[in-house]
Image (cartoon, helix red, strand yellow):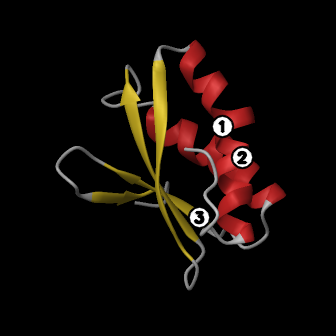
Amino acid sequence: MFALQDDSETVAMIKELLETRIRPTVQEDGGDIEYRGFDEETGVVKLKMQGSCSGCPSSSVTLKSGIQNMLMHYVPEVTGVEQELDDEIQQPVNFHC
């Protein structure tokens, strides 16, 4: 998940935050997180929850209250986070359903 030379500054910042601050916390709970992409036009980060987090109902809460808030705080270009599921269906993190 480390930043590549081809990554934009924004993507490099997102990956660094995921690797140094977010991923260790998720791993403490027996899960993991995988960076899947960033849409520079919409500001949406795509992530995949893995391990015990992949099927956990709390993963949406984790994405919204923890990961999304941190990314939006440190990377102003980020407007939201979407979870990619195993069947490749993207699930926007939204509590107003």
Q: Amino acid at mark 2?
A: Glu
Q: Nearer the viewer, residue 14 or 93?
A: 14
Total numbered labels: 3
Q: Amino acid at mark 1?
A: Glu
Do tag 2 and tag 1 residues touch (Cβ < 8 Å)? Answer: yes
Which residue does the image show at 67% across and 72% down from the upper left?
A: 8
| Residue 83: percent from left, percent from top | 41, 51
Which residue does the image show at 64% across and 53% down from the upper left?
A: 3
Give the class, few, some or many, for how many residues have Cα within 10 Å of label 2's Cα (few <14, many ≥20): some
Label annotation for residue 19: 1
The quadrant the C terminus occupies is bottom left
| Residue 36: percent from left, percent from top | 43, 55
Do tag 3 and tag 1 residues touch (Cβ < 8 Å)? Answer: no
Give the class, few, some or many, for how many residues have Cα within 10 Å of label 1's Cα (few <14, many ≥20): some
Q: Secondary structure at mark 2?
A: helix
Instruction: State the separation of the CA atoms marked 3 and 1.
Output: 18 Å
Instruction: State the separation of the CA atoms marked 2 and 3.
Output: 17 Å
* Image-based side of 97 in relation to 81, left or right: left
Label annotation for residue 16: 2
The quadrant the N terminus occupies is top right
Sequence-wise, the earlier of marks 3 and 1 is 1
Residue at the farthest right position: 74
Q: Secondary structure at mark 1?
A: helix
| Residue 2: percent from left, percent from top | 61, 45
Q: Is residue 4 above or below residue 86?
A: below
Q: Amino acid at mark 3?
A: Gly
Q: Nearer the viewer, residue 92 or 54?
A: 54
Q: Secondary structure at mark 3?
A: strand
Residue tagged 3: 80
Which residue does the image show at 22% across and 43% down from the upper left?
A: 86
